[in-house]
């Protein structure tokens, strides 16, 4: 399957239309997928670096499964770390509207494709899918497939611009899902505002938490190697707590606590109670178990 | 005791959290091993600044050089001595932009104009570029990509730190 060149593919719609009468049963989705997959795919090569890495996985995925259940694995985004909820969301939509696929006549196709962009992108998942033909066009490959809209300029510049705009819109959709509370807002400017606010909030939180950590930290020195690797017995934990623990307690008892975050004033009392422990290993092991639970 | 079990991540998010926590705790331990904590005002301020730098450094080093923001953070931290010295000298040498396969980390060049597609309002986008580290000279498409990644890692870092604070405060 060559995936390098791209061209305007009006005749592909004709092919799909001729394939429509075949779609009778519930397996039509796989038939649809088989059809575009076997054709020579003309794609606009997206300039992202991630796509060569994603493509082998996509190819293996397409080779593996033919049932509609496995098609959910086809929709692989170029940025695999971002947001796998998008493809999962799209699949039920597609399978839901697919059984309503009668042989679609030409004007309907042209209207539906005139209304929306005739672009197949993997990233563009949030667009409403109205017709089955639109879904058939959606090839599950991480490339941007740009088609000429009817009555639109078809020179390379506007095409590339449109592809770029679609990519940017798709990324905005991803960001909208990442930032909580961004779904209700519409429009690019408001979404960007929300994103900026969220980033500022997170940075403020980091600063505040770092200040808190600076004050509350030095109770127990944790030996990380023993905590994060598998161990055999408890005897390793006794070495974990450093001797500075005792000195900290002394300094704590002498000086005044200037900062009063929430947890600070509790420090003196738990420490004095803990002084009565004969083995410091209890504290350390309890600490590590707490950390593991929370993580 | 149950603490001797190995940490097995159940989903990729918790694996990320574990990696972040490990890195962060490493740096925190070295921070606290160096100086014993005093409780006067200025020392705490200085320590909190160091902890903040440690948080960002650990976050960026977990990601590695794959991302523009992580590269920018690591570069800034490594050269913050040099940057502070240059700030004192007031004048800024505008360095030519090194044409690099990845985006070059460089000091701010005031003569450079960022050509952005006017689909985005320039005021908002400039704000976003200032917030996300290393995002001043990226095309808008990659900028959105970087912000998404940055937000994800920031959120996990905040969660790790919050857990740590809770842990330490309930001893």
Image (cartoon, coloured by chain):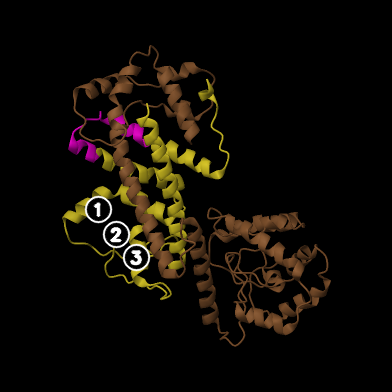
Where, by quadrant of the figure, is residue A237 drawn? top left
Is B130 displayed left or right of B83 in the figure? Answer: right
Q: Which chain is brown?
A: A
Give the quarter of the figure containing the N terminus of chain A. bottom right
- Rounded to the nearest angstrom, the CA distance separating label 1 from label 2 is 8 Å
The answer to whether residue B71 is seen in the rendering is yes
Q: Which chain is yellow?
A: B
In the rendering, at what x and y percent does residue B99 appear?
39, 65
Query: Which residue corresponds to the image point at 43% horizontal and 43% vertical from the top-left?
Result: B159
| Tag 1 residue | B83
In this view, B36 is above or below B49 = above
Is A214 displayed left or right of A5 in the figure? Answer: left
| Circle on res. B107 | 2
Is A28 displayed left or right of B142 in the figure? Answer: right
SS label for mark 2: loop
- Rounded to the nearest angstrom, the CA distance separating label 2 from label 3 is 10 Å
The segment highlighted magenta reads B27-46
In the rendering, at what x and y percent does residue B124 appear?
36, 67
| Tag 3 residue | B97
Asked whether the residues under the numbered discs 2 and 3 touch, taking CB atoms below 8 Å apart as contact, a structural biologist would say: no
Asked whether the residues under the numbered discs 1 and 2 touch, taking CB atoms below 8 Å apart as contact, a structural biologist would say: yes
**Membership of B35 in magenta stretch:** yes
Closer to the chain start, of discs 2 and 3, is: 3
């Amino acid at each position: 399957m060559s995936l390098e060149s791209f061209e305007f593919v009006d005749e592909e719609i004709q092919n799909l239309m001729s394939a429509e009468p075949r779609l009778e049963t519930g397996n039509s989705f796989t038939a649809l997928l088989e059809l575009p997959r076997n054709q020579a795919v003309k794609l606009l090569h997206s300039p992202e670096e991630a796509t060569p890495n994603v493509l082998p996985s996509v190819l293996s995925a397409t080779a593996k499964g033919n049932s509609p259940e496995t098609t959910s694995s086809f929709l692989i985004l170029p940025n695999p770390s971002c947001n796998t909820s998008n493809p999962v969301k799209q699949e039920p939509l597609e399978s839901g509207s697919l059984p309503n696929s009668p042989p679609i006549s030409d004007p309907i196709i042209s209207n539906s494709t005139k209304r929306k962009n005739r672009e197949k992108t993997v990233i563009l998942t949030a667009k409403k899918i109205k017709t089955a033909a639109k879904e058939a066009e959606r090839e599950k490959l991480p490339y941007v497939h740009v088609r000429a809209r009817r009555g639109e300029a078809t020179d390379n510049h506007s095409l590339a611009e449109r592809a770029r705009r679609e990519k940017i819109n798709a990324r905005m959709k991803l960001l909208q899902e990442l930032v909580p509370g961004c779904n209700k807002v519409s429009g690019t400017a408001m979404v960007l505002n929300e994103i900026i606010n969220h980033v500022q909030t997170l940075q403020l939180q980091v600063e505040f938490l770092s200040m808190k950590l600076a004050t509350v930290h030095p109770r127990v020195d944790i030996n990380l190697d023993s905590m994060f690797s598998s161990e055999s017995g408890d005897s390793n934990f006794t070495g974990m707590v450093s001797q500075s623990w005792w000195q900290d307690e002394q300094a704590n008892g002498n000086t005044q606590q200037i900062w009063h975050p929430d947890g600070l004033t509790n420090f003196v009392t738990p420490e004095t109670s803990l002084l009565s422990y004969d083995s410091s290993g209890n504290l350390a092991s309890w600490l590590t178990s707490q950390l593991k639970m929370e993580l | 005791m149950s603490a001797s079990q190995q940490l097995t991540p159940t989903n990729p998010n918790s694996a990320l959290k574990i990696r972040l926590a490990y890195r962060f705790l490493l740096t925190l331990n070295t921070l606290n091993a160096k100086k014993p904590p005093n409780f006067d005002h200025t020392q705490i301020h200085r320590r909190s600044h160091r902890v903040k730098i440690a948080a960002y450094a650990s976050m960026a080093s977990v990601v590695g050089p794959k991302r523009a923001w992580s590269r920018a953070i690591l570069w800034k931290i490594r050269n913050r001595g040099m940057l502070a010295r240059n700030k004192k000298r007031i004048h800024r040498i505008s360095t030519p932009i090194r044409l690099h396969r990845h985006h070059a980390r460089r000091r701010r060049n005031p003569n450079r104009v960022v050509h952005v597609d006017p689909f985005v309002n320039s005021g908002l986008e400039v704000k976003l570029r200032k917030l996300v580290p290393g995002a001043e000279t990226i095309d808008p498409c990659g900028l959105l990509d970087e912000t998404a990644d940055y937000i994800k890692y920031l959120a996990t870092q905040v969660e790790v730190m919050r857990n740590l604070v809770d842990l330490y405060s309930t001893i």
